[in-house]
Image (tube, coloured by chain):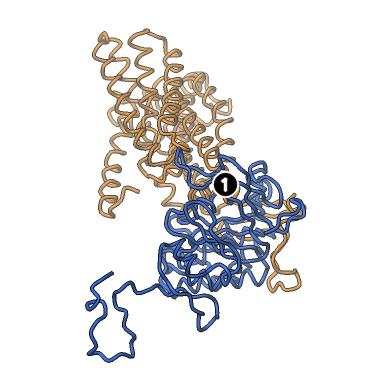
Amino acid sequence: MTMTSASTSSSPLEARDLRLAYDDRIVVDGLSVSIPRGEVTVIVGANACGKSTLLRALARLLKPRRGTVLLDGRDIHRLPTKQVATQLGILPQQPIAPEGISVADLVARGRHPHQRWLRQWSVTDEQAVEDALQATGMADVADRPVDELSGGQRQRVWIAMALAQGTDVMLLDEPTTFLDLAHQIEVLDLLHDLNRRDRRTIVLVLHDLNLACRYADHLVAMKDGRIVAEGPPREVVTAEVVEDVFGLACQVIDDPLTATPMVVPVPNGRRARPASEPAGAPDPALVNGHR
Amino acid sequence: MDATVDTPATPPAADHRRPRGTGVTRAPDGSLVVRVSGGLSARLDARSVTVTLVTLAAALLVFAWAMTLGDYPMSLGDVVRTLVGQGEQRHEFVVRTLRLPRGLTGLLVGASLGLAGAIFQRIMRNPLASPDIIGISNGAAASAVFVIVVLGGSSTEVTWGALLGAVGTGAAIHLLAYKRGVSGYRLVLVGIAVAAMMTSITSYLLTRAEIYEAQRAVVWLTGSLHARGWDHVRSLAVALAVLVPAALALARHLRVLDLGDDAARGLGTRADRARSGLLLVATALVAVSVSSAGPISFVALVSPQIGRRLVGGSSAALVPSAALGALLLVASDLVARRAFSPTELPVGVITAILGAPYLLLLLARANRIGSAG
């Protein structure tokens, strides 16, 4: 990884020597990372490894104790809140949809950073919302209340809101949590398409390593507040790294459909029987009696 | 201004439905948008406007009607003629000195309570979060009773005492609830505790008071518009001239504060600062109204709820709530004056009689749904 000159850096968002803490508990220390422009970056790691904390710091929601976050080469904490909001959007883990709000109304609130006292609803605002609804396939339900939508659709509405904000960089904190598998894929496909359409820089925190491998151009693996490995999924995801980061013994094989790495956990002594074996064969777990 | 980053994602050629640059259109929340050349645009929620106008008209009717009634009844025509300076000499004093300032004080106090209640309830995401429940009115009351009972202060001094009490209590609640920013939930809990403390201070002071002072204190504590003069109207008008525009300016942030603090910050609003500003304005609104009319209960609680129901959608309904507060208070005052005439009740008695069943209804319904929010 090279960081030649800050001003002409190709990264729209980078962190240098971050120390992040809640009260007295230091969660991340001495972390540096630079997010590649126009790509999908996925941050993975075990629970409480500091990945969401890092995302919050990148989004300026958390002030670092030490170090800086640079947005287009400038210290994000020295920029006005409103200006940051025109360059970088964040979809938090659990945003609140006000009771009874319609899809279009919620998406329109993404335009807040572009509005002023005497420019409360401009043509650009209208266009951006229309566009975001189209891009996320929500134009047909624009007038429906958000409460009536399914979990997957609701997440699309929030993504549409972030999209309407019209920022070059979009951060999403676990956008697929609480969704069933089909809706997870739906949301990730949408983000992938948005990235390819506008070359928008997207940073995600994800739980599912296999999905992360599928959708990431750049994968960042974290453990105990540090980055263990980063790069293309193919280079990052090895059995050793997964063992180290997740404490999980596994084999890494090729995903048969996308040829991206796919993590198959070692069965750990239970149920380790090929499906082709005759049903009458003794269960190895019972025979070996170990975990 | 931010044209460099504000480029639409698709080139203009691809537009199938090009929005109009000038004229009237609709925003996604249903509000009317007026655009003029030069890129200026303003939005108005049509339903809010309707509700506000109808309510205000009703409030003015009640206000005018109230001025005809009293120990010295007169016709509406007489009242109007007196107001425009064409009236008879004998009406002058009754209308201009007695009834007009009382009615105006009622309108202004009601409006500020309605507006303050709407802001509190919206920020704390809790329909019960009104200044008479989270301790601000109680703080004003304790302070005013202290001035009456211990210092034996004049009515002007009582006014100042109430004002300082409200602001001081508001600040104390804010500080006590502060923990890496203020959350609505903590504010409500701390506020209820502070309210209980302030009420006990008031009770203690009353037990120590001489009978005359105690009576004066109790009348003040009920909340009354009796004998309100032009001094009250003037100070209320000056305060509202500052506070209402401030509230409306900050109200823009409610649209994103509604989405949670992280989302609001991500959308370019300093959530804590915006919320503190709104709380400060709402507290000041309560302070000026309590200092002019005593701690009139339930207006701040009920008006925003009616307002939100009438306007519908996700609107904060600040202005309609203010109008409803004004209507509610002048109507209650009319009842207070006439229901048992010639005996006149303090208006606070009527608002409590009307408001208490509403609160019970609200609690019962919240229980049925299984949440207090």
Residue B351, compared with residue A172, is above or below; it is above
Front one among B292 and A288: A288
Residue A171, given in percent of the width and then of the height, sits at: 57, 58
- What residue is shown at x 60% (from left), y 65% (from top)? A231
- Colour in which the image shows chain B: orange
Judge whether residue B337 can be spotted in this image. Answer: no
Considering depth in this image, is B70 or A87 the residue closer to the camera?
Answer: A87
- Residue B126 point in image, percent of width and height: 38, 44
Q: Nearer the viewer, residue A144 or B87?
A: A144
The crowd level at tag 1 (other Cα within 10 Å; few <14, some 14-19, many 20+) is some
Q: Which chain gets the blue colouring?
A: A
- Classify B16 as above or below B302: below
User: Which corner quadrant of the image does residue A127 belong to?
Assistant: bottom right
Going by the image, does A71 lie left or right of B156? right
Q: Residue at x 73, y 55 (%)?
A: A9
The percent position of residue A251, horizontal first and vertical second, equals 44, 74
**SS under mark 1:** strand
> Which chain does tag 1 point to?
A
Q: Amino acid at mark 1?
A: Gly
A128, A282: nearer the viewer: A282
Q: Which residue is mark 1?
A: A30
Q: Is residue A61 above or below residue A221?
A: above
Q: Is residue A209 above or below residue B59?
A: below
Residue B7, position as x, y percentages in the image: 72, 61
